[in-house]
Image: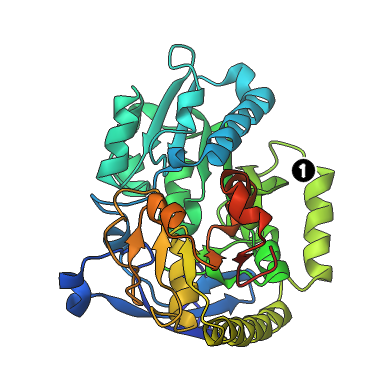
Amino acid sequence: MICKITKKKLIPFMSFGKMPIANGFLRKKQFKSEFFFNLEVGFSKSISLFQLNEHPKPKQMFNNNYPFFTGSSKGMIQHFKKYSQWVKKNYGKKIKHLIEIGSNDGTFLSNFDNKKINVMGFEPSKNVAQISRKKGIKTINKFFNFNNAKKFKKLKNNIDVITAANAICHVPNLISLIKGINFLLKQRGVFIFEEPYLGSMYLKGSYDQIYDEHIFIFSLSSINKIFNLFNFELIDGIPQKTHGGSMRYVIARKGIFKKSKRVNRLLLNEKLKNIDNYKGCLKFKKKCENSKKKLISMLKKYKKNKLKIAGYAATSKSTTILNYCNINTKYLDYICDTTKEKIGKYSPGMHIPVVSMDHFKNNPPDKSFLFAWNHKKEIFIKEREFTKKKRWFAHIKI
């Protein structure tokens, strides 16, 4: 295994086994040709970076039929509204040009007035990029990297703010991405992005954060060390509740802005909790193995009592749980979801049928595996009657 930043050899510390593309929901005729890879993770000690060894090519994951839309969640719409307000409050007085990397359906960028700020999104998945364009948002249907960034010569060192959310961890070639940011960003510009946080994953034991799209799980320590290599520095870190625990990072060129006291405090906390070193990896590995044993034992008990079990929300994260724990139709009758692109298909690897929410309401299970546990508040309100009967469970405490 080779570190994707330092290019030094790494020793993988855990394998989750053969894994399909997390968002690769498929039809029966596609079962025999389904793509699999070995989901193996390692840790770069020199830059404290948790990363995948092998992963599918980006174009296999982010294609013309990418079945994820930010705007499908009311909670995420609200979060991105607040995120945009925070950007405006802290950096908005002088913003003339703003770019979002991985802009999806334009949910975040739609919060900015195009007449006052020139906004532009980079989105590699054609189907979601088209939705963004329909909203009147300038969207480039390409991956953000140095080669694509330098095509915008007129914008060289002219962008005030570059943003991203749950997208930077998807990029295998971070070096090219950072070079692209360096090409476009103003001298006093900032790069602000949010990602699932390694510390939260360790604390909860939420190994379902690990799948093909999440090539990296970042910490403040890793971000600080990576960007230091390219004459940038981490000037702030703000914990977020999204995705079961995320972190908002603020990056600037070295020596331009003063570092916040909060970021220094958070970096110290990572040392104390072994988030910045290999000990944390080994402790996390034990948590994953224990979680798997407990989950399989619980499912066997439910089935022994002849309970009907269904999955709730056909998420990317569910693919890791189902395949790592070998949970198939022997345990789950179906998975319900609201995304029309997934309904009528089967889950990656384990081939559990994906049905509509109407099916869930008309054929309620005795127990439901909540795969979208990070949206539990929104779901518990939506499914009040089911929630009252305490029928939910997950692979982590909810």
Name the image colouring. Answer: rainbow
Expressed as whole percent of the image width and height from the top left, the position of residue 350 reads 36, 77
Q: Residue at x 55, y 21 (%)?
A: 95
Q: Nearer the viewer, residue 289 or 4?
A: 289
Compared across the picture, whether 274 is left or right of 361 comes to right
Q: Which residue is mark 1?
A: 259
Question: How many residues crowd around disc 1 within 10 Å: few (fewer than 14), some, or many (20 or more)?
Answer: some
Up-down relation of residue 99 to residue 246 (above or below): above
Which residue occupies the extreme top position in the image? 115
Up-down relation of residue 161 to residue 358 (above or below): above
Expressed as whole percent of the image width and height from the top left, the position of residue 254 reads 66, 44
Q: Nearer the viewer, residue 161 or 36?
A: 36
**Three-letter amino acid code of the residue under disc 1:** Lys
Up-down relation of residue 349 to residue 204 (above or below): below
**Image label count:** 1
Q: Secondary structure at mark 1?
A: loop
Q: Residue at x 43, y 79 (%)?
A: 323
Q: Residue at x 46, y 57 (%)?
A: 313
Compared across the picture, whether 110 is left or right of 46 comes to left
Q: Residue at x 57, y 40 (%)?
A: 75
Q: Quadrant of the C terminus?
A: bottom right
Residue 82 in sight in this render:
yes
Residue 215 in sight in this render:
no
Expressed as whole percent of the image width and height from the top left, the position of residue 47 reads 62, 68
Quarter holding residue 266: bottom right
Expressed as whole percent of the image width and height from the top left, the position of residue 225 reads 64, 61
